[in-house]
Amino acid sequence: MSGATTRRQLLHAGAGLGGWLLLRPAQAADQLEEAIRAWTGGAPVQTGRVKLDIAPLVDNGNTVPLAVQVDSPMTAADHVVAIAVFNQKNPQPDVVRFTLGPRAGRASVATRMRLATTQKLSAVARMSDGSYWQHTIEVIVTLAACLEELE
């Protein structure tokens, strides 16, 4: 009888793990969307004007360069107020936030980040007229970082 119980427990554990694996991507997508929604205050976010420049395939997630450019004349009447970068599966969804103004000259920022695993990244720009624009890209990571904090 103990062999049947062990098999039954194994089947239950396997089913539970399968369900968890199906729900985890949805939770990660929700984490990304929720972080963006919190930063924008729920305002609508349009696609365009922002270009997130990062390699689509990353060999090592420990230090990944990224740059963000926003199409803006950067004048007093029309400029980028802020740029934020969000990730889908790292322990913290907020990567970085930059504050800009018309005196910046151009709306372009660069930094490095760690990537825990293959995931989506979004760069969102807040414009002086109150609108929000974004660019989302999926990055494949072959050697992950931040693993100790994922669970």
Image: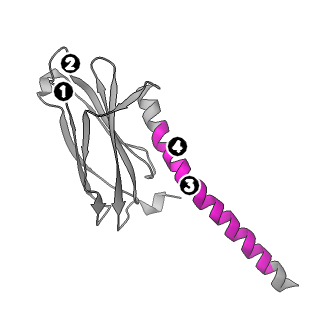
Crowding at label 1, few (<14), some or many (≥20) Cα neighbours within 10 Å? some
Examine the structure image and report whether residue 20 is included in the region drawn in magenta: yes
For disc 3, the marked residue is 24
Question: Could you tell which of marks 2 and 1 lies nearer the N-terminus?
Answer: 1
Residue at 35% across / 63% down in the picture? 141
Determine the image quadrant of residue 76.
top left
Tell me the colour scheme of the image: one colour
Alpha carbon of mark 2 to alpha carbon of mark 4: how far? 31 Å
Residue at 42% across / 26% down in the picture? 44
Question: Could you tell which of marks 1 and 3 lies nearer the N-terminus?
Answer: 3
For disc 4, the marked residue is 30
For disc 1, the marked residue is 72
Residue 78 is marked as: 2
The vertical placement of 95 against 125, above or below, is below
**Residue farthest along the right direction in this orientation:** 1
On the picture, is 48 further left or further right than 93? left
SS majority, magenta:
helix
Residue at 20% across / 18% down in the picture? 78
**What kind of element bears circle 1?**
loop
On the picture, is 72 further left or further right than 34? left
> Bounds of the magenta span?
6-34
Q: Position of residue 37 (x, y in %)?
A: 46, 32
The answer to which of 112 and 119 lies nearer the viewer is 119
